[in-house]
Every structure is written in C-alpha cells, then in structure tokens.
C-alpha cells in the first residue's frame, strides 16, 4: 500500500509534465521570461515577446528561414560599410499595404548596433492624414511598440551583461523571438519605425519607413528585402525583412543596426515585389535614357539648322 502510493505520485506527476510539454509543443507559445521594461514616448506595447521556437509557426521560421537569412545578412549587409546602394534592398518598405486581413507577426533577427533600439509600427488607412513627421507617427493613436529593446547577446556589441545565447535584462532578445503584433484590415498601410537608443532614452529620435517624415534628411533609415535573394530563393514566401539604420543623418549607413522579419502573408509580399524600390541602376538607366533623348533632340535640331 505504502509502496504503491510512493510509486503512483511520481508517475502521476511525470505524466502531467509530459502532457503539458506535449500541449506546449503542439500549439502554445511561451512568453519570454525576460521582457524589456523600456517605454519610450509612452507607446503602447503590442504584446509580450514570445520565446523563439515556442509554436509551430516559429519553429518553421527557425528551420526554413533563419539559417539562410543569417548567411545572407553576413554577406550582403556587412558591418560599418556603406550599404545604401546594396542590391539587397529590393522592395520599398514605404509600400507595405496589406493585401488581405492579416495577423502580423514580427521576429527579431539581428542587431549590429551600439544603441539599445526600440522597434514599433503605426498603421494608416488611405483616409487617414499623413503624420507631420516621424515623432508624430511614433506617438500616433495606432502606434505600438514591438520590440522595446531589440538588443541581443548575439549582436555585434555585447554590453557585458550576458554570455552568447542568453537573454538578460539589457540584452533581452535572441534571434527567432517573436511578437504577434495584431490583426489589421485589408488595405492598411503599415509604417515601421526605429527609436534610436529608445530603451535608454524616453525622448529617442524616431526614424520611419516613410523617408519623407525623417527630420534628419536621411531617407533610407529603413530598407527591405525578401527571401527571393537567398542563395536558394524561396518563392511565394510570407516573409519580409526590415533593416534599420539608427544614427542621425545615417551615420555609417550600414543599414543593419536592427533587422526584423515580418510575416505579412504571401499576397502582400508578392504585391511589394511587383512594385520594386527604384534602385541605383534604374536611376542610372533613367538618366542614361534622358541623356540619349537629349542627344537625339540635339541631332534633330542640328539637322534642321544644317
Ligand atoms: Ca551596424
Ligand atoms: Ca549603422
């Protein structure tokens, strides 16, 4: 009797633990035990940061995207080099307009920054007024913080509070940690912003995907690319990557100080790919076209004169 009781209890506990673990791995997400406490500009926090790999979607992201993405970033967006003309930036981040009603998820991917940056999003319908500037956008009613402190021990600058691969109070995220940002209606335009040093500075500078709103005159604080550019391109992918420059005026212009991945759905990504950002070669081609046109005009004029 006594023996069977002592056997039963540990077995029952073990069964309960196993059942709980099975339930978690099947569906549940796990809230990260380390949440940043920063609240720059008193912006509403979208949702808690969830642990990398704690649901099926994030496991899929970790397995199918993150390894190729990390390799791509290392080769295409090197630290402290001017990446403004990089071919990596294939789509215009100022044109993220949802093709369907969409539950948007953001994954932390990379940081190559000395600052402890915050990342957020504001949303606009076509009828909404355009914000006056990037600060106005960051404090708009629709604005939400996604990663209040996008700093990681796996980043370029480790602040010394933790070893590689750990989450600490001041380096709270690891690659693959994610936030379910919210569900937005079809036609919503998403404007992402970086608050430079936002985790340490309540009145941090805000830099928007809409370059026209940035008060420092540097229009490329946010650039974007997709899985199409990987060594093995992934077609019809729902992922879009935003890469941020955190320094006033552009600084070193490496545009890799914080990098996040967004799951915005295949239709929205394909729509962005259909309207690529005007890249340097296109601009050059346009200039060349104008020059040839001018030469032709000049020839015609010469022909008339002579
Ligand atoms: Ca950097
Ligand atoms: Ca930089």
Image (cartoon, rainbow, N blue to C red):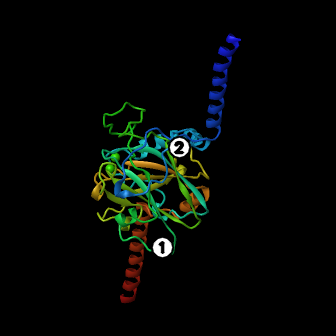
Where is residue 95? Give x, y as percent: 49, 64
Marks 2 and 1, how far apart at CA: 40 Å
The residue nearer to you, when weighing 35 against 233, is: 35
Res 128 label = 1
Most extreme residue toward the front, as rendered?
Answer: 1
Picture quadrant of residue 133: bottom left
Helix, strand or loop at mark 2: loop
Residues at circles 2 and 1 in contact by the CB criterion of under 8 Å: no
The residue nearer to you, when weighing 12 against 269, is: 12
Q: Is residue 76 above or below residue 163?
A: below
Q: Earlier in the sequence, mark 2 or mark 1?
A: 1
Kindly tell me whether residue 84 is visible in this rendering. Answer: no
Kindly tell me whether residue 304 is visible in this rendering. Answer: yes
Label 2 CB-ligand 1 distance < 8 A:
no
Res 231 label = 2
Can you tell which of label 2 and label 1 is closer to the viewer?
1
Q: Tell whether 186 sits left or right of 5.
A: left
Q: Residue at x 59, y 63 (%)?
A: 99
Where is residue 90? Give x, y as percent: 48, 57
Helix, strand or loop at mark 1: loop
């Amino acid at each position: 009797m006594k023996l069977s009781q002592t056997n039963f209890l540990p077995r029952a506990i073990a069964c309960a633990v196993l059942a709980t673990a099975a339930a978690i791995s099947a569906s549940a997400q796990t809230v990260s035990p380390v949440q940043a406490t920063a609240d720059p500009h008193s912006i509403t926090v979208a949702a808690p940061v969830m642990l990398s790999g704690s649901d099926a979607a994030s496991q899929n992201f970790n397995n199918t995207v993150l390894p190729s993405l990390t390799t791509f970033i290392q080769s295409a967006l090197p630290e402290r080099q001017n990446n403004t003309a990089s071919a990596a930036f294939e789509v215009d981040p100022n044109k993220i307009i949802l093709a369907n009603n969409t539950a948007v998820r953001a994954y932390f991917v990379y940081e190559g920054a000395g600052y402890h940056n915050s990342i957020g999003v504001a949303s606009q319908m076509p009828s909404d007024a355009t914000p006056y500037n990037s600060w106005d956008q960051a404090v708009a009613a629709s604005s939400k913080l996604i990663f209040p402190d996008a700093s990681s021990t796996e980043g370029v600058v480790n602040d010394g509070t933790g070893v590689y691969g750990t989450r600490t109070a001041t380096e709270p995220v690891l690659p693959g940690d994610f936030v379910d940002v919210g569900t937005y209606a079809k036609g919503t335009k998403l404007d992402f912003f970086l608050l430079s040093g936002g985790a340490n500075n309540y009145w941090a500078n805000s830099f928007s995907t809409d370059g026209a709103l940035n008060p420092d005159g540097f229009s490329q604080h946010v650039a974007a690319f997709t899985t199409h550019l990987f060594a093995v391109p992934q077609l019809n992918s729902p992922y879009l990557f935003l890469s941020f420059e955190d320094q006033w005026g552009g600084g070193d212009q490496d545009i890799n100080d914080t990098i996040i991945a967004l799951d915005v759905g295949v239709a929205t990504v394909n729509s962005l790919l259909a309207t690529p950002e005007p890249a340097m070669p296109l601009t050059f081609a346009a200039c060349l076209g104008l020059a040839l046109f001018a030469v032709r005009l000049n020839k015609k004029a010469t022909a008339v004169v002579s």
